[in-house]
Amino acid sequence: MVAAGLTLAGCSDDGDGTDAGPGSGDGSGGEHAVETDATLGKVRGELDDARAAEALAAVTEVVDGWIDGGYAGDYPRGTFDEAFGAFTDDARELALAQPAVMSNAEVGDRLEGAEVTQRSVSVDVLGVRGKPAGATAHVVLTVELEGGPDGTQRSDQVTGRLLLTPGKDGWRVFGFDVSRGEEGA
């Protein structure tokens, strides 16, 4: 696999960036062509099984919003801002500046279609005093693109991690380290 890019965003206390809740604004309605294979990874600190399971579900919802808004959906299209509804302002700005990695924005207006054929998420959770205090979502996606810039079909793999923190409006992505490359290249 040839890497198309690497992105890293740092911590931010700039607010939630939007009034939308986690996973909102993605247009997915909670249904996906391929369901997310979500698993609980490492749980560190003080956190019972029920709270860990709640964190897994909430973080997966945020990740699904990014996937559905950034890679799935109707094509051709030119806007992908909805993919970052659960990102902080700083993280959203950095993600929008990386259109070839964090979404299909670089080629979205020339695509005939895009389908996410694999989506897996493993979530590590940190617990403090019995409550989730942070999470890392390890993501692996396969995206099938049709009718790209040269009219051919290709399969891309997106891998990396999203760093999340809980807040009054739900879980927010405050950082990420994501790469994208063409499968089999």
Image: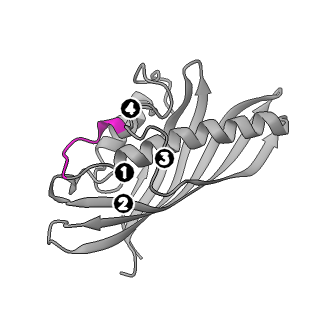
Magenta residue span: 76-82
In terms of secondary structure, where does tag 2 sit? strand
**What is the CA distance from the residue labelled 3 to the residue labelled 2?**
22 Å
**What is the CA distance from the residue labelled 4 to the residue labelled 2?**
19 Å
Tag of residue 25: 4
In terms of secondary structure, where does tag 1 sit? loop
User: For this view, does 9 lie left or right of residue 70?
Assistant: right
Question: Residue flagged by tag 3: what amino acid is it?
Answer: Phe
**Residue 81 lies in quadrant:** top left
Tag of residue 180: none
Is-magenta flag for residue 77? yes
Are the residues tagged 4 and 1 within 8 Å (C-beta)?
Answer: no
Q: How crowded is mark 4: few (under 14 residues within 10 Å), some or many (20 or more)?
A: some
Question: On screen, 36 above or below 130?
Answer: below
How many numbered markers are drawn?
4
**Residue 79 lies in quadrant:** top left
Question: On screen, 29 above or below 33?
Answer: above
